Image (cartoon, helix red, strand yellow):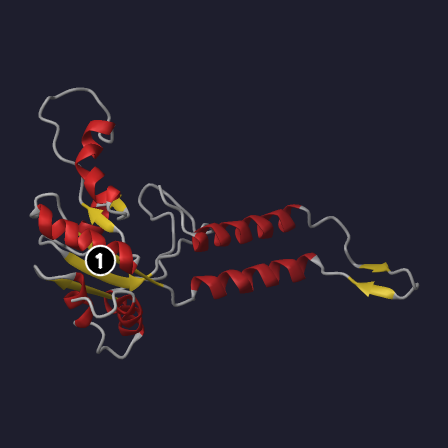
Amino acid sequence: MKISFLNSLVAVLSILAATACANAHVGLDSQTNNSGSPTQILTIDDVLTNAESLKQEILNTQRMEAYLLVSLSMPQAGLKRLATDAKDAGIPLVFRGVPADNTKTSKPLLNPESLQPFNYLIELGASVEINPEIFKEYSVSEVPALIIRKQKVKDPSASSSLNQSACTDTGSAPSEAAVVLGDVTLGYMLDSLTRRDDVIGDEARNIRSRLGNRM
């Protein structure tokens, strides 16, 4: 499981805030320095206010992420080309799942045999992920598909239950994501977004620059 730096930082801030609450009985009103003059010390309320302010700033940051959705059913030559371009562009290749196991063994879904078909892409330097949820979230039934969206940051302070999400989704509303379909190169997919005058267009131009003049 991949945990982003942003999510980790938000979690740390929440822990700091919770720790401050648990130790609220400890006095931090004032101390004196070597010269005898009073030195201002942060109070528990100061710590909580600063932690919450920084956490909200992180949650609201316009960070973008991109994925290239593909399938092992695609022609190998085309998949190799996309793998090379995705590696240079810094985009992961995302698969819906692993090939079906027709032997009906009791092996775990992810095992050396089931992951072997991805080896040649990894050897090309591509980052390979398996994420069926993103296919479902954007109703992607055709590949390749390029997704550029505002990064999702999970707020660990949100309540959870069996019928309620355990996180607050602060991104990836339909207006904050773009999906490009087509049996074309990654360069062409990015070119279709570079004319946009928004954060998605900015990210598309940023990624496109890593490919140079490659089409």
User: Which quarter of the image is occupied by the N terminus?
Assistant: top left
Quarter of the figure with residue 73? top left
- Left or right: 143, with 213 as reference point: left
Residue 130 in view: no
Q: Residue at x 10, y 22 (%)?
A: 103
- The quarter holding residue 101 reads top left
Residue 3 position, x and y percent, is 40, 47
**Image location of residue 209, percent across then percent down:** 28, 69
* Residue drawn where x is 40% and y is 53% of the image: 154
Query: Quick check: 200 above or below 74?
Result: below
Quarter of the image holding residue 155? bottom left
Pick the quarter of the image with the C terminus. Answer: bottom left
The correct choice, above or below, for 109 with respect to 105 in the image is below
Q: In percent of the image, x 49 and y 66: which residue is there? A: 57
Whole-percent x, y for residue 96 in the image:
17, 44
How many numbered discs? 1
Bin the neighbour count of mark 1 within 10 Å (Cα to Cα): few under 14, some 14-19, many 20 and up.
Answer: many
Residue 165 seen anywhere in this rendered image of the structure? yes
Q: Label 1 amino acid?
A: Asp
Q: Residue furthest top?
A: 105
Task: Name, please, the residue furthest toward the right.
Answer: 36
Of the pair 41 and 89, the residue shown nearer to us: 89
Q: Which residue is mark 1?
A: 85
